[in-house]
Image: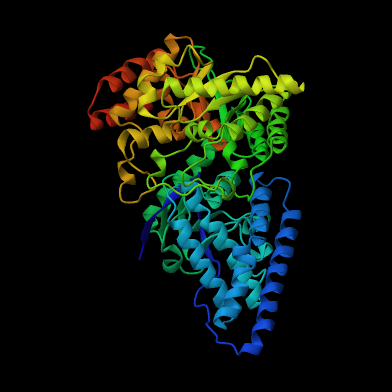
Amino acid sequence: MSIILHGVAVGGGIAIGRAHLLAQSMTDVPHVLLACEEVPAEQLRFDEAIRATRKELEMLRGSIPQNAPAELGAFLSLHIMLLGDITISYEPRELIAEQNCNAEWALKLQCDRLVEQFDAMDDDYLRERKHDVLQVTERIFKNLRGHAGELLAPDILADDTILVAHDLSPADMVYFKESNVAAFITDVGGSTSHTAILGRGLDLPSVIALHHGRELICEEEVIIVDGLQGVVIINPEPVVLAEYRRRQRAWRDKKRKLSKVRKAHATTQDGTVIELLANIELPSDVNDVHGSGAVGVGLFRSEFLFLGRDTLPSEEEQYLAYREVAESLKGAPVTIRTMDLGADKNPKWLGRSSADNPALGLTGIRLCLAEPLMFREQLRALLRASAHGKIRILFPMINSLSELKQALAQLDYARQELREVGFPFAEEIEVGAMIEIPSAALVVGSFLKYVDFVSIGTNDLIQYTLAIDRNDDSVSHLYDPIHPAVLKLIGHTIKTATRGNVPVSVCGEMAGDARLTRLLLGMGLRRFSMHPASVLAVKQVVRETHLDTIAPIVSRMLRSEDPDKIADLLQQLNAQPDV
């Protein structure tokens, strides 16, 4: 019987192959009561498992293939760092003594506690970090049970193998590069999980968050993985299999065509030059930028330098990270967003409790202005790095002209501090404001006198406009980037900035969605910033578009307040023949 599952698509393309199920580890964990005299030996066994896991991860980090995604080493380093956290390496030892239990049971208890804490967080990125904890504890568990390294044997897997797992860790991904598997699917994960990020980086058809896929799929069963639509089909009917083979051929042909435009200019049919930039989270992501065909970095999310650590990064650490990116881009622009922290995106060193409604709390520029010393430390690091490349500074979550003026005052203060100590920096550095709150979009005209550019963060703008958390399964279907209210705010921002001769970009998910490229072009957008993997698809649409042809349809979309009509017009827009 054929079964269809729906999940989250994180890797493009279509794969057809046979399932290979990866063993689950922390299921049916035994609970053994120990005699008091047995506790020290059990604690020693736990310590040995920690050491073995560390050695294993370090060995894997040292054997990463040169063509692996840049994130792979960083994520393995994060897992090695997690091994040193007392909540993982020490507190299970205490549970062994407190409950006279075996190490496996103590590890499971502690893991369950940590998962509960992560599940209580509202921020989607931090909530997804529970999977890193699970992946590390599962590897410790395997070493406790003496089953380390049994994940798979890359040399015996066929090229049409589709990996089926409850979850996959960055360490598992090292094997992927050696085995040339066709695709992978998992039961857990979200759009910001490391599994998703690596899936995009590996450019493998992949679907996550299937919930029950591993329970329903049998070893060697034929399955289809549609990484475009987020669909997995188990034991497909012959007619479905034939259709997907046709789609697979079409997708491969499309990829071959896309590779030809990597070095081509992003220019419309009528000669308008479009700037395509990439989003990054770590300095190591620059490798992906170079391979994507992007002309620079439109959004460097600097808060990732602040997360996952026990202390605030120093000015020198930040300066070196920003300098690395600026030098690696060799004169191409890099827009660095100041730290977007606060509320539940709350590192240990910050020492703030989670707010009841973190999205409306002390976050983004509000936190920066509430902590001026910390803010100026970052601003000084950014200014110093500007001496080594074309750096632009972007302020997040600007709500009003007053906030913008305060942020600019702190930047002037940081400049003066550097002059006093003699550090060089670029005197002319572009500064921008993120438009991701409806109030900012409505009064964007008042910002233009004070900024060199504006950047629309569509992810938050949509959520704040529609009062919808797209990570909440119960309402995520209502998250609609072409809702008439959303389009009016984006259209107003682009039109106002363009009239004021201030460059405007979109750096949210909408920028990387090729289905929306012509819509944004028709609204007047000329600067897009997206995940590196999306650049070629968007560039292809740009090169096939004539602005005069799409203008009337986009104009009708912006005038309409009927969602169904807008959806129909979008289809018509994308059906326009190449000119």
**272, above or below 67, in the image:** above
- Identify which residue is drawn at 34% across, 24% down: 489
User: Colour scheme of this structure image?
Assistant: rainbow
Q: Quadrant of residue 25?
A: bottom right
- Is residue 15 among what the camera can see? no
Give the vertical position of 302 relative to 173 (above or below).
above
**Can I make out residue 301 in this image?**
yes
Which of these two is toward me, 277 or 236?
277
| 465 relative to 72 in the view: left or right | left
Q: Nearer the viewer, residue 63 or 94?
A: 94
Please count the marks in the image. 0
Where residue 470 sits, quadrant-wise, is top left
Q: Is residue 33 above or below residue 137?
A: below
Is 30 displayed left or right of 551 in the figure?
A: right
Pinpoint residue 151: horizontal percent, then vertical percent: 62, 67
Q: Residue furthest left?
A: 562
Q: Who is closer to the viewer here, 483 or 108? A: 108
Identify which residue is drawn at 34% across, 20% down: 554
Quick check: 215 above or below 541? Answer: below
Q: Position of residue 537 (x, y in %)?
A: 51, 32
Q: Which quadrant: the C terminus?
A: top left
